[in-house]
Image (cartoon, rainbow, N blue to C red):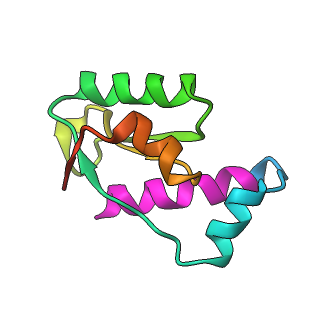
């Protein structure tokens, strides 16, 4: 849950730090229900492949890497990827084959 929360906050955190205005689609998400869908991958490599596909599709992405302080035996580990917010059709084009978590 903590990793998912980090991912959900990454978009907003970057917007504030970069003093960036949200796109119209992002404004609709911010004014709406903050829809999130949790999906799963089978490996870190699949997570990285999904990230590359999302970036190639022009989607906003934020990889969450756990520092390893309480889990993963002190080894920083990629745990979660936030994609969007954007139109569900654009995100589904990248993530549509993944299983719900």
| Residue 6, x across and y down, in percent | 45, 57
The number of callouts visible is 0
Q: Quadrant of residue 56?
A: top right
Q: Quadrant of the C terminus?
A: bottom left
Q: Quadrant of the N terminus?
A: bottom left
Q: Residue furthest front?
A: 89
On the picture, is 60 further left or further right than 67? right
Q: Residue at x 55, y 49 (%)?
A: 84
Please tell me whether the stretch drawn in magenta is mainly helix, strand or loop. Answer: helix
| Residue 8, x across and y down, in percent | 48, 60
On the picture, is 24 further left or further right than 13? right
Residues in magenta, as a range: 1-15
Q: Quadrant of residue 100?
A: bottom left
> Does the magenta run of residues contain 25?
no
> Does the magenta run of residues contain 13?
yes
Q: Residue at x 24, y 41 (%)?
A: 98
On the picture, is 35 further left or further right than 12? left
Query: Does residue 70 lie above or below 72 as drawn?
Result: below
Give whichever of 94, 83 is nearer the camera: 94
| Residue 68, x across and y down, in percent | 28, 41
Q: Quadrant of residue 5?
A: bottom left
Query: Does residue 72 lie above or below 51 as drawn?
Result: below
Q: Residue at x 49, y 53 (%)?
A: 88
| Residue 3, x across and y down, in percent | 34, 55
Q: Residue at x 36, y 25 (%)?
A: 48
Give whichever of 78, 91 is nearer the camera: 91
Give whichever of 18, 23 is nearer the camera: 23
On the picture, is 39 further left or further right than 20? left
């Amino acid at each position: 849950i903590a990793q998912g929360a980090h991912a959900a906050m990454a978009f907003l955190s970057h917007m504030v730090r970069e003093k960036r205005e949200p796109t119209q689609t992002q404004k609709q998400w911010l004014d709406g229900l903050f829809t999130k869908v949790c999906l799963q991958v089978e490996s870190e490599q699949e997570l990285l492949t999904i990230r590359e596909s999302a970036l190639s599709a022009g989607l906003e992405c934020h990889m969450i890497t756990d520092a390893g302080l309480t889990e993963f035996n002190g080894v920083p580990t990629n745990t979660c990827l936030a994609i969007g917010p954007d139109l569900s059709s654009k995100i589904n084009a990248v993530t549509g084959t993944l299983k719900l978590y």
